[in-house]
Image (tube, rainbow, N blue to C red):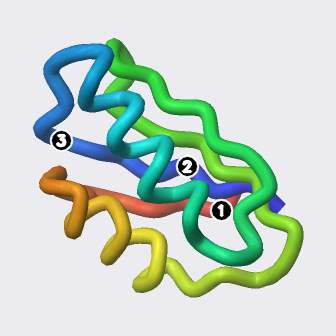
């Protein structure tokens, strides 16, 4: 399963790495691809992960989640 997380507040490559690292720490996240230009992250999940957990990880890293959609 893949989910697209719309993220506000990223402004540089460091922000992208910060978001990637925060999401990769969550159990069940198999891979993460973050787009600075598109303001989103695509996460591939190996097991079910609650949207609230994904949102919390991004927000704890200092960014705002505006939407999470299953792809």
Where in the figure is residue 45, as x and y percent of width and height? 78, 64
Say which mark, if any, is on residue 13: none
Q: Which residue is at the front of the view, 28 or 39?
A: 28
* Cβ atoms under marks 2 and 1 closer than 8 Å: no
Q: Which residue is mark 1?
A: 70
The part of the image, by quadrant, that contains residue 61 is bottom left
Reading the chain from its start, which is encountered first: label 1 or label 3?
3
Identify the residue at image location x=59%, y=72%.
Answer: 26
Where in the figure is residue 13, as x and y percent of width and height? 31, 16
Q: Which residue is mark 3?
A: 8
Q: CA distance from mark 1 to mark 3?
A: 18 Å
Q: CA distance from mark 2 to mark 1?
A: 6 Å
Label 2 residue SS: strand
Label 3 residue SS: strand
Identify whether 57 is placed above or below 9.
Answer: below
Reading the chain from its start, which is encountered first: label 2 or label 1?
2
Identify the residue at image location x=76%, y=73%.
Answer: 28
Using residue 65 as the reference point, say whether residue 25 is left or right of it. Answer: right
């Amino acid at each position: 399963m893949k989910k697209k997380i719309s993220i506000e507040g990223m402004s540089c490559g460091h922000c992208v790495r910060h978001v990637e690292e925060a999401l990769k720490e969550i159990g069940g996240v198999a891979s993460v691809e973050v787009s600075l230009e598109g303001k989103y992250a695509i996460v591939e999940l190996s097991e079910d992960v609650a949207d609230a957990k994904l949102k919390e990880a991004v927000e704890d890293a200092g960014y705002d989640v505006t939407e999470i959609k299953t792809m």
